[in-house]
Amino acid sequence: MAQLLLLRGAKQLLTLRGPSGVRRGAALNDLGMIEDGSILIQDRRILSVGPTRRIENLKESRGAIDVPVHGCVVMPGFVDPAIHVTLFENRASSESVAKRKKALNFYEESLLLIRSCLQHGTLNAQFKVYSEAGSHVADVAALRQLATIGSVPVGTVRSLRLLADPFDDVKPDTLAARFATLRRRSLTQFLEILANAEQAPNEPFWEMLSQVGLPLNLIWPGGSAEVLRNLLALSHARSVFCPAELSSQECSVLAHSPSIAVFSPCKELLEERENPSAKKLADAGGAIALASGYDSKDAPIFSMQMVVALAVLRLRLSVEQAISATTINAAHAVGCADEVGSLEPGKRADILVLNLSDYREIPRRIGVNQVAMALREGSFLINRKRAKASV
């Protein structure tokens, strides 16, 4: 007989229910909130979600394990679209040579990072592998270690980051074969390209990438809006990782694109940059998501609670927009929105219970970890409340 679990009596239940596609415009502010809400879980998935009185009266609830979550905010687990990892040590200076880590050390460091992200509420994330040395062998080795870790305890998506157009020293056919091998071995789910913002796109390069069969992400450093428009037309990028400062023309291009613009407010904080581009883009109907942008050297922050707070305090988003951008839209950005990002029947039971009575307190309690419970696929990974379940 399938085990049933009832999370009962949340002060605020943020379901993020809404349209099937990425959230834009007014939909970004709709959290699908239910006061005094409950969730019924069966076989790792959400069976039903709604007001507590209705859920309690379902016949399936009668034999469920009861977990009271009174006075708490219950919401989907955070999805982080950008955690950067590399097989190379941080260089002491720009002149020093990057030293390659041992595979076992990289594995242990990555697993520790994943567990740390979990402690702060990230239940799914995209890990981006890159090397400043441009070593394909090292990148493949790192991807293999991440694949070995798999999706326990956090669901992972792997992306290979290319720092430049590599046609100068590698033939297109050779590159295509490399990427096709990575796709066939399921070592990476995305290719990510650092765009040249000042030059016209190299069309043969993008034509080669389109034939590999891997979805593409774009790193946009900021620059010509016309180049950005052409790149989006060539790449059909799922996500575009953007700096804080975007011109009105760049915002307009992204607002009319199906691509999701991803911002990393933690990195902008450390670089002392502040610009309301994310707000302008959201208000213009653009699709936005938020990421930690974690990098052990340049942005060593992985808490998505901090991301929500900084998005409100520095990017000028509403709390509702920030939560949508770190859950359902972030899930769309990494290609897993059919499984996670909202609390709806049929989706995986990846759920957070926050030690808050009102979700609007998240930015006011910046720096405090509010995760009381975390469930992934219906199983408790964190239970700081020490709640006693009963049948």
Image (cartoon, grey):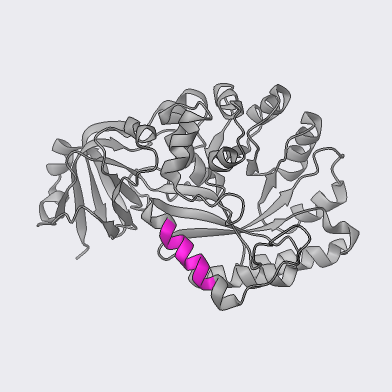
The answer to whether residue 378 is seen in the rendering is yes
Is 84 a magenta residue? no
Q: Position of residue 151 (x, y in %)?
A: 46, 64
The answer to whether residue 327 is seen in the rendering is no
Quick check: 91 above or below 316? below
* Residue pictured at 61% horizontal, 27% vertical: 277
Give the residues in magenta: 107-116
Quadrant where the C terminus lies?
bottom left
Q: Depth check: 153 or 38 in front?
A: 153
- Secondary structure mostly taken by the magenta-highlighted segment of the chain: helix
Residue 9 shown left or right of residue 242 in the figure: left
The image quarter containing residue 115 is bottom left
Residue 78 shown left or right of residue 56 in the figure: right
* Residue pictured at 37% horizontal, 56% vertical: 119
* Residue pictured at 38% horizontal, 36% vertical: 16
Quick check: 104 above or below 387? below
Q: Position of residue 350 (x, y in %)?
A: 36, 52
Quick check: 10 above or below 93? above
Q: Position of residue 385 (x, y in %)?
A: 20, 52
Q: Depth check: 112 or 187 in front?
A: 112
Residue 312 shown left or right of residue 224 in the figure: left
Q: Position of residue 247 (x, y in %)?
A: 71, 25
